Amino acid sequence: MIHDNIQDEKACSESAKISVLQDNKMLLQQLDVARKDFEDLHKDHEELQVKSKADVKLLVKEVKSLRNSQRELKQELSRLMKEKLEVERAVNKEKQITENVIAANAKLLHECEILHNRLEECSVNFLVEEEDKLIVDTSSPSDAIDLLTTSDNRIGLLLAEAQLLAQDLENAVARSDETHNTNGSDRTDNELRKMLTETFIDNARLRMQVNSIIRCALNIHLKSDKDDEDEEAPLRKTVLSKFLER
């Protein structure tokens, strides 16, 4: 009986021992699995950390590059805006200069037209072409001389106005050369305006010279008329031709 109890206890003990060993073996297996899972997770975590650091480093580099690019783009934009303003100012200045030139040309043409019309009103013509000769045609040489004197006085006033106009033009050209660079077109306009005023002045002087020639011819006629006081016919002699032959 006692022996059977001992056998039973021994069997139970062996059974318990086997069960504990099995449990330990299972626990060890689970521990190995858990350790392996932990190592895998740790490895994955380290790889993620390395990748994350690399990504952060790359992002930092890209951010720096973008900031540099942004700064360069801002500088380029500032430069372009400055150039745009300078071009706009230059265009507006050139536009204003062009408008001023057009206005100056229109004013000069208007003034020259007025002077030309007034010069035409000063014309006194006693010359008539007859048989390839110029003759003086007037019934009263003394009245003709008075008209010539009046014409000369009026032409003299017009000539003074034209000379003042030419001086104003020359001063305006000088100021224009000082304030901005004169290009080829500006120089051409200036030369044309100068030529126009000089042409008018030359025309006025030529009119006065013609008047002087006619006056001399009339004076010759008056002198010769004293030698023939009985002649009643209107003056139609080639006295101008005689004067030119002297």
Image (cartoon, rainbow, N blue to C red):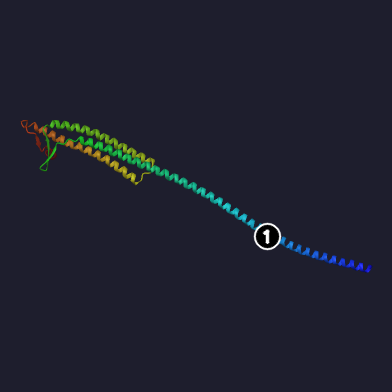
> Badge 1: how crowded within 10 Å, few (<14), some, or many (20+)?
few
Q: Quadrant of the N terminus?
A: bottom right
Q: Is residue 46 above or below residue 92?
A: below
- Give the position of the C terminus as an image quadrant: top left
Residue 144 in the figure: left or right of residue 50: left
Please say if 26 is above or below 123: below
Q: Position of residue 119 (x, y in %)?
A: 22, 36
Can the viewer see residue 192? yes
**Residue found at x 36% / y 39%:** 175
Q: Nearer the viewer, residue 141 or 105?
A: 105
Residue 191's quadrant in the figure?
Answer: top left
Is label 1 in a helix, a strand or a loop? helix
Q: Residue furthest right?
A: 2
x, y (%) of residue 52? 64, 56
- Type of amino acid at the residue the image marks with label 1: Asp
Can you name the residue that lies furthest to the front here?
1
Q: Position of residue 220 (x, y in %)?
A: 12, 34
Can residue 246 be seen by looking at this rendering? no
Q: Is residue 87 above or below residue 21?
A: above
Q: Quadrant of residue 62?
A: bottom right
Residue drawn 33% across and 41% down? 102
Residue 59 located left or right of residue 153: right
Left-right relation of 50 to 144 = right
Q: Position of residue 168 (x, y in %)?
A: 31, 36
Q: Is residue 25 left or right of residue 191?
A: right
Q: Give the image quarter of residue 176.
A: top left
**Numbered circles on residues, count:** 1
Please report the residue visible at 87 percent of the width from the left and 66 percent of the height from the top.
12
Residue tagged by mark 1?
A: 44
